[in-house]
Image (spheres, rainbow, N blue to C red):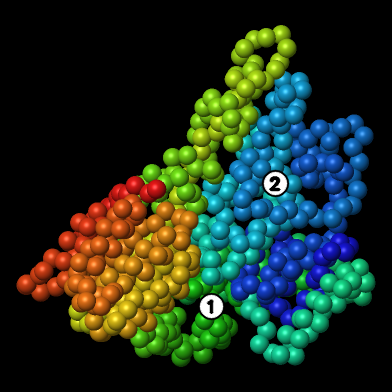
Amino acid sequence: MNQATFPFSAIVEQTQLKTALLLCAVDPSLGGVLIRGDKGTAKSTAARALTDILPLIDRVVGCAYNCLPGAPYQHCETCNAEHATAQADSVPFVTLPLGATEDRVIGTLDLEQALKGGQRVFKPGLLASAHRGILYIDEVNLLPDHLVDVLLDAAAMGVNAVQREGLSISHPARFTLIGTMNLEEGDLRPQLLDRFGLMVEVTAPRDKAMRSEVVRRRIAFEANPTVYAAAWMQEQQALRHQLATAQQLLAEVTLDDALLDLISHLCCEFEVASLRADIVMHKAARALAALDGRSQVTPQDVRSAAELVLPHRRRRKPFEQPGLDQEQLDDLMQQALQPPDESESGDEYTGQENSESNGEAQDQQQVFAAASANNVRRLEVDTASKRFNAGKRSTAKDAPRGRVVRAVPDQNPNSLAVGATLRSAALRGSNEFQVTKDDLHQQIRSGKNANLILFVVDASGSMAAQRRMEAVKGAVLSLLTDAYQQRDEVAVISFRGESAQLLLSPTRSVDLAEQNLRELPTGGRTPLPHALSVALETLEKTTMPPLLVLLSDGKANVALNDGNDPWQESLRFAGLLAECGVPALVLDTETGYLRLGRARQLAQALGAECLTLEELSAENLALTIRGCLK
């Protein structure tokens, strides 16, 4: 046993989390598990502890591909050696760091071998190391898009294909994907979310006795990991035996057609689009039966599987969190399992009615309604910024991460293009192969940059007409949806009465921004200068390329300093923002026949685009916001 790992059997409660991990051990083809929850809720502890209870696997010592003995990968020199022998070993547990390069993940040309003998030899990456094991990603929602693409390809095919540096290699890469994430850091890309077979929501225990037991066990473990692990040896061994038995039994477990119909019924009622849900539910239900030592799946197995498979796959509205209505699930189970003559009397119930009634309850809880959010133009930021944060909004011309698009000569490269460098040395045609500074090449990568979108929302009395404020909130929610899809950070400033306030500091959690905006009250005067001042202070602290989105009619009537003209102060701060090169968009919310046009004047001072709310939603086209960031 790994003495530095907290025992899996010693984890307090978290029953659903432990069950999901055990199911992935019984049937690795489930696709893994996503663990969502706040910090300090045993997400990483449970994931790392799983390996200590997994039955051992046979592998050849020193094999970089974790080949299956008897069926080695054709290019694996270790397994194809004449006297290669396999022995029992622990299941691989590979951690994929967020800052890993694409070369480190998929593999690349072995530079050392190339320099020694001039041969093209493949150096395996993390995907090879994780084959037949576990690939673990902490804060998986922050994984850069170019690495997400790599994982999606490997997860779909079970093969890692490498075409680069003159190499053309494919090797097996079947692994169980375990990811953890904190909702405060934003959501996960939908394509990758669907690849996780199961999802678990974890929270810290509310019972004080349980919390104290968690602390007691953790302190005891940290005091002497070896002694503490030995105290749980019997429980660990029992779990290992249970898993080994379940793995052997799995092939014999059957699921009858009636329960298969139930699985499809639940997927339809919860409006799950992906057929992967039906397949994974079938596998999870069989794994549950095997884990319990049974060869026949029961309706309760299907229900338990639904709680793990459906929450992250059901069709959701923007900003609606994944989850499953337990009452609806109970009703659907009861309805499906009733005899035919009884089920007819229950036809009044439908999942649609339930969701509609839930929607009404949610509407009643909203402090202030927002109009339906229409599709808005896609906003792109065209800047000369050298700062880079992985995202999807704007193209970074020379990103530190992303796909390699070309190589250029560079005697002091910070990202060496190995293949181009070696080819340059070889083409010189000298008798002795030698790399000089003149041969060095720099990798040029293409990536997508994220932005900080700062919403500055006028909530004053000049905009207090209910229908107008509903339209404003609807527009902001549309922009927030766009920000979520582009993996941006967002921040929100509102201004009303005598001052402005930063409602939400920069965060990837657009859900928090949406909640703040829905609960935003209106009324009072218009302290526009203070709002622009707070915006300037906020943007000076960011390390991300910003985009300022101001929603206002521009009718400032509260000065930042007594005796000053509020409008002139507003223009002055707008000028300061323009001098900093902040790309901006002004949404003019002024209504009526007599319009002062203050918002458009403010946009001119900002050097910004100016649109009405109607113009923003008029076309589903890209609107490029230009700036010159310093």
Label 1: state its secondary structure.
loop
Q: Is residue 313 left or right of residue 113?
A: left
Query: Which of labels 2 and 1 is toward the front?
Result: 2
Say which residue label 1 marks. 324
* Rendered image: mark on residue 125: none
Q: Position of residue 129 (x, y in %)?
A: 74, 47
What crowding class fits label 2: few (fewer than 14 Cα within 10 Å), some (14-19), or many (20 or more)? many
The one of 154 and 204 positioned closer to us in this rendering = 204
Q: Which amino acid type is marked by label 1? A: Leu
Name the residue: 38% across, 76% down: 501
Name the residue: 73% across, 85% down: 211
Please, is residue 125 above or below residue 133 in the view?
Answer: above
Q: Position of residue 182 (x, y in %)?
A: 58, 69
How far apart marks 2 and 1 lie (CA) works out to: 34 Å
Say which residue label 2 marks. 126
Q: Position of residue 529 (x, y in %)?
A: 27, 70
Q: Is residue 505 left or right of residue 433?
A: left
Please, is residue 499 above or below residue 170 in the view?
Answer: below
Q: Quadrant of residue 234?
A: bottom right
The one of 398 and 501 positioned closer to us in this rendering = 501
What is the total number of numbered labels drawn onto the structure image? 2
Name the residue: 67% across, 74% down: 40
Please, is residue 8 above or below residue 401 in the view?
Answer: below
Quarter of the N terminus within the rendering: bottom right
